[in-house]
Image (tube, grey):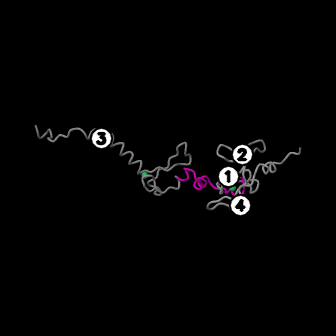
Amino acid sequence: MARSTPVERFAAKTTPGPVPTGPNTPNTPCLLWPEGSLDRDGYGRFWVEGRVVPAHRWSYEQKRGPIPAGLELDHMCSVRRCVADGHLDPVDHRTNVLRSTGPSAVNARRTKCKAGHDLTDPANVRVSHPPSHPNGMRKCRACARDRARRARGSQLAPVATLPIRTTPERTAA
Ligand SMILES: [Zn+2]
Ligand SMILES: [Zn+2]
């Protein structure tokens, strides 16, 4: 049996999918990677030259050339197992997150917090970097102040119930 080339093996794994629907999606069909060869996040895995690589990145580099350092490939079709090079757009991580529909993307696009404070005002926004959000998540300062005030209020509450002296000691003496 003749050894097949990576390009042939790659082509043998893919099946044409539907043309994506939705705003700003490509008008060509997806090229789908088999469900059995996906990583935890749903991206295709391709075994080539002794290692496993993301199938969509390999596809893009074969057809279009190297992906610029630091850039990710955004699936314009929103189909993670699609490896159609025409559906992939090299963008920086933040753009990729903003374009996606996951909770962090929705949060990053929000202009108001749950309480209605302005999240477009940099003075009201604190960006933290917890391990779950290495690229930063936005926190509302006004809400943090309200929380702190409520916490102080509950600590002070017992003091307010003490009997109030109506006669100051000094004048009574
Ligand atoms: Zn696609
Ligand atoms: Zn708020």
For the point 56% across and 48% down, the residue is 135
What's under tag 1, amino acid-wise?
Ala
Residue matched to label 1: 69
Q: Classify mark 1: residues with Cα within 10 Å, few (<14), some (14-19) or many (20+).
A: few
Which mark is first along the chain, 4 or 3?
4
| Image spot of residue 95 (x, y percent) | 60, 55
C-alpha separation, residue under disc 3 versus residue under disc 2:
59 Å
| Image spot of residue 167 (x, y percent) | 14, 41
Q: Classify mark 3: residues with Cα within 10 Å, few (<14), some (14-19) or many (20+).
A: few
Q: Nearer the viewer, mark 3 or mark 4?
A: 4
Residue matched to label 4: 28
Q: Nearer the viewer, residue 152 or 81?
A: 81
C-alpha separation, residue under disc 3 versus residue under disc 1:
57 Å
Q: Classify mark 4: residues with Cα within 10 Å, few (<14), some (14-19) or many (20+).
A: some
| Image spot of residue 12 (x, y percent) | 79, 49
What's under tag 2, amino acid-wise?
Arg
Q: Secondary structure at mark 4?
A: loop
**Could you say which quadrant of the image residue 159 lies in?**
top left
Q: Which residues are magenta?
A: 82-106
For the point 43% across and 50% down, the residue is 141
Left or right: 93 with respect to 170? right
Residue matched to label 3: 157
Asked whether mark 4 lies closer than 8 Å to ligand 1, one says yes
